[in-house]
Image: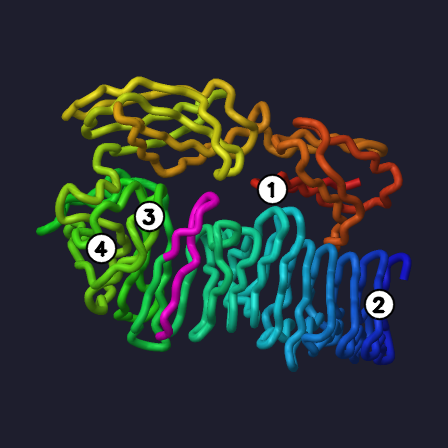
Amino acid sequence: VCNDLNVRSTGATRTLSVNGASSLTAGGDVACERLGGTGLVGMVIAASSTFQGGSLRVASVNGASLEGLFRCSDPTSQLQVLGNVDVQPGGYLDLGGAGAELRIGGDYTNSAGDVHFNDATATLTFNGTVDQTVDHSATEFVGRLRVDKPSGDLYLSSALGDLIVRNNLDLLQGRVFPGTGPYLQLQDNATATNASDLSFVHGMLVKVGNDAFTFPVGKGNLLRPIGISTVSSASDALVAEYYPADPNVVVGGAMGPGLDHISSCEYWLLEPHTGTPTANVTLTWRDPYSCEVTNLPDLRIAHYDGPTDTWYDRGNGGTTGNLLNGTIELPASHAFAAQQPYWALASVNNENPLPIELLAFSGRREGEQVRLEWVTASEQDNDYFTLERSADGADFTPIATVDGAGTSFETLYYTEPDRAPLAGWNYYRLWQTDFDGTTTVSPVVAVWMPAGADTPLTLQWDAERLVALHGQVPGGHWTLLDATGRILREGVLQQEHRLELGIGDLPPGTYLLRLSDGRSAESARFVR
C-alpha cells in the first residue's frame, strides 16, 4: 500500500487479514476505526507474517467497546510501526495469546485504559532513533518492555498511573527516564536483563516480590546497580534510585558508632514502596566512579536514619570482586522502616578514601558561562586539579588546570568558570594529581546550557508560513502532527534558534509541532 491504510466501518463487521507467512507494508499511516454502528473493525496478522506502517491508531465511536482492532498473537510475526501507536477509546491492541512483539519507532499513547491493550504476553519494543515517550490515562501493564534504541532515550510521561512490567524489562540500548510522578514497576518474579552503561533506569524503579533482584539504576551515562535478596513477602515492594553526589552534603548526618566516614561520591535510595519488607542489601563499587576502594575487610555498608540524622554501620557480610569493581552485602537481612531511605559505602578507618578529602564538586549556569566549584576538607601532597568537560559523559577533554595547596588540613574553596560551554548538556569531572603523579577523580556533574538564549518554544505564523523560535541543538528532530496525533511531516533541525515551515497546503485545523534534540523535548500547538 503506497499511502495511508484505513480499515473503517459504519455498519458491518470488517476485518482485514494478513494470512500466514504473508507481508503487508503501508507507505503511510494505519487506522482501525469504527465510525458508527457496532462490531469489530480492524486487522488480524497471522503467524510468521510481516507488517509495517507509518503510525497505528485503533479507536471506535463506542468508547467502552473493544471494536477498533489490531490483533497479532504469534511471536513469529514481525510487526514494525515507524511512527506513533495510539490506543484511543473503543480501540483494542491485542498482542496476547502466545505473545507478539510490536516494534515502535515513535511514541506510545493509551488514552483508553489498560483493558484496551491485551498485554499479558505482549512485548513492546521501542527502537526509534529520537527520544520516545510512553503515556497512558491510567495504570498500564505490559508483558515485556524492551528498549533497543540506536539513539535517544525513552521517557515515561504519564502522571495518571504506574507503568507495570509483568515479565521482563530488557535494556539493550537507550536509557529509561521514569519521571517524578507514577513509577516504573516490575511485578513479582519479573526480571531485568542486559543493563549496561548504554541502557539503564535513569531514576526510580519499583520492584514487587520476594525474588532476588538487581536494580538496573544509574545516572548520566553510568550504570550503578543496587541489589536485594531474601525479601520477606511476595507482596512487598522496594523502590531504588542512584545518586552520583556527595551524601555528606546532600543528605548530611553524623557518623554512628564505628564509622570513620562514608563515601563522598555516591549513594543510593532504597526504601519500602508497599508493605514492611525485610531483605538483604548489596551495594556495588566501580573505579573511578566510587572514588577508590583500598581495603575490603574495612569496607562497610552505611545506612541513614532520618529521625536521628545519623549514618549507622550495617556491617560487611562479604565482598566479591577486587579493588576496582565489586560488591558488598549486609551480614543479615534488614527490616526496612520509614524515614530510612539512603545507603552508601563506608569505612571503619581512614582506608577506603571514597574520598574523604573532596567535600563537594558542583556546577551551575551563570548567564552564558558555567561556574564550577569544589571544596576540600584536607589535602596531602596535592599538586594540581584538572577540570574536564564532555558532551556525552564518556569522552572528556581538559578545559582548565588549577594549582593545589600542597598539604593542608583546613577547608579550602575553589572556583573556576567554563567560559565557553557547549550547547546542551555539559558533563564535568575533576581530577586531582599529587606530586608523585597519583590521581583521583570526582563524580561527574551535569549542567544544561541552552543553545544561545534560554528560549522556550514560541510559534509565529500566518496563512502561508510558520516560524518556530526555540532553544534546541542543531541536528535535533522536528515533527508536525495533526489533532489526531498523525505525523504529517518531520525533519532535522538545521539552524540554531529558528525553524521555518511552509503551511499553506494544510487544511484548517489544530496542529502540534514537536522538537527534540535527544536531551530535551518541547512542543506547542497552533491553529490554522
Identify the residue under disc 2: 24
211 part of magenta stretch: yes
Disc 2 residue crowd, few under 14, some 14–19, many 20+, Cα 10 Å: some
Q: Answer whether labels 2 and 1 touch (C-beta < 8 Å).
A: no
Q: Answer whether labels 4 and 1 touch (C-beta < 8 Å).
A: no
324 or 149, nearer to the observer: 324
With 169 as the anchor, is 223 left or right in this view? Answer: left
Identify the residue under disc 4: 301
Outermost residue to the front: 436
Dot 4 amino acid type: Ile
> Whole-percent x and y of residue 141?
55, 69
Magenta span covers which residues? 210-225
265 or 316, nearer to the observer: 316
Quarter holding residue 62? bottom right
149 part of magenta stretch: no
> Whole-percent x and y of residue 439?
31, 32
Identify the residue under disc 3: 324
Dot 3 amino acid type: Leu
Work out how far the residue at label 2 is from the one at label 1, CA to CA, in angstroms. 31 Å
Quadrant including the C terminus: top right
> Looking at the image, which residue is at 47% across and 72% down?
190
Q: Answer whether labels 4 and 3 touch (C-beta < 8 Å).
A: no
Q: Earlier in the sequence, mark 2 or mark 1?
A: 2
Comparing marks 4 and 3, which lies closer to the viewer? 3
Q: Earlier in the sequence, mark 4 or mark 3?
A: 4
> Looking at the image, which residue is at 76% across and 43% down?
490
Q: Earlier in the sequence, mark 4 or mark 2?
A: 2
